Image: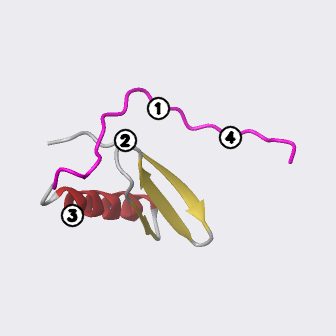
Amino acid sequence: MRSLKYVVYREGKYYVSQCLNADVSSFGKTIEEAVENLKDAVELYLRDEPKNISFHDVGDALIGETQVHA
């Protein structure tokens, strides 16, 4: 069993869930659905686990928001 860290954000009428351990994302109509769909997607991604799959442990994570002058 592996520990997943993820971020969820709203995009239009859906919630997008993005895994921080691997380049995998999913979405759903609710936060819970988005997270469950992400878990399924990561499990499929890791199912055969060829050597070129990148899955790395993530320590502490911080989600923030700021503004930039652009």
Q: Earlier in the sequence, mark 4 or mark 3?
A: 3
Residue 23 left/right relative to 15: left
The nearer-to-camera label among 1 and 3 is 3
> Which residue in the structure is indicated by mark 4?
65
- The dot on residue 44 is 3
Write down the residue under mark 2: 5
Secondary structure under badge 1? loop
Upstream in sequence: badge 2 or badge 3 = 2
Residue at the image point whose x is 44% and y is 54% from the top: 18
Q: Are discs 1 and 2 less than 8 Å apart at CB?
A: yes
Q: Amino acid at mark 4?
A: Glu
Bounds of the magenta span? 50-70
For disc 4, the neighbor class at 10 Å (few under 14, some 14 to 19, many from 20) is few
How far apart are the two marked residues, 1 and 2, measured between alpha carbons? 8 Å
Marks 4 and 2, how far apart at CA = 18 Å
Q: Position of residue 42 (x, y in %)?
A: 27, 57
Residue picked out by circle 1: 61
Displayed quadrant of residue 4: top left
Q: Is residue 56 magenta?
A: yes
Describe residue 9's horizontal placement relative to residue 49 as left or right: right
